Image (cartoon, grey):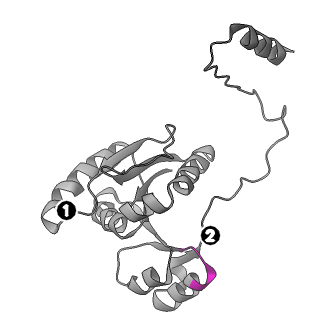
Amino acid sequence: MSVALLCGPTRCVEEPAMLQRLAVGLMNEGVAITSIWPTGSQDTQRSSLVPRMSIDMPVSWLMRSRRRRLVTEELAALEVNQLVAFGGAAQQLATDVAPALGAAVLVEVASMAAAERCRRSAPVDVWLASSPSIHRRLAERIDAQRTAFVPMGVATGGERAPHGEAGPVSIAVLDGGGDVATMREVMQGLRS
């Protein structure tokens, strides 16, 4: 599975850390992730583990065709099959490129006001409600089969095999201070 997380201008300011944790959590589950953020977004929580492309969001209807071509080419090369949009501008981009990719569109709905703007006719496969009340409202307005309650944040993974039973273990040790003697001691301790 290959997923593109599309973050609109408002959501990337409001929830950058949550979105990065989500991406890293999905990567931990074996999902290939690419994130798409608005050009010029000031993201201080950016993880270098998550590939990211920047694109203008939102754009006028005159620029949508060009943007659609650019993003479709990039995401087709990555074989993206799911687009998850956070915010209205991201939803516009997701619904623009999904038909050319044959990708499913999932859209986060983080407020009751946003739930009221959702339309049954929108080309969205699943509306992701961030609270039970939003989920109920979406089920009434759209269709219960096209909505899911997905609380904000990232779920912890299932049970993991105890250390030693899961196979080889990798450890990364970073030394920013250049203290050779201490690093030798650390490496000796790891060998024991």
Which residue is at the front of the view, 182 or 107?
182
Disc tally is: 2
Q: Helix, strand or loop at disc 1?
A: helix
Q: CA distance from mark 2 to mark 1?
A: 31 Å
Q: Amino acid at mark 2?
A: Pro
Give how far across and how far down residue 21 sits, in percent: 58, 51
Q: Residue at the location (51% across, 47% down)?
A: 45
Q: Is residue 67 above or below residue 160?
A: below
Residue to which mark 2 is pinned = 151
Q: Examine the rendering and report whether any part of residue 83 can be seen.
A: no
Q: What residue is rendered at 33% in x and 42% in y?
A: 77
Of callouts 2 and 1, which one flags the residue occurring earlier in the amino acid sequence?
1
Task: Note whether 124 is above or below 132 in the view shown.
Answer: above
Asked if the residues shown at circle 2 and circle 1 are in contact, with their CB atoms under 8 angstroms apart, the answer is no
In the picture, the quarter occupied by the C terminus is top right
Which residue in the rendered view is the most extreme toward the bottom?
140
**Picture layout, residue 86 above or below residue 134:** above
Callout 1: few (<14), some (14-19), or many (20+) C-alpha neighbours within 10 Å? some
| Kind of residue at badge 1 | Arg
Q: Nearer the viewer, residue 38 or 101?
A: 38
Between 30 and 130, the one lying in front of the other is 130
User: What numbered label is drawn on residue 185?
Assistant: none
Q: According to the image, label 1 marks what residue?
A: 64
Residue 155, position in %: x, y?
A: 68, 59
Is residue 135 within the magenta segment?
no
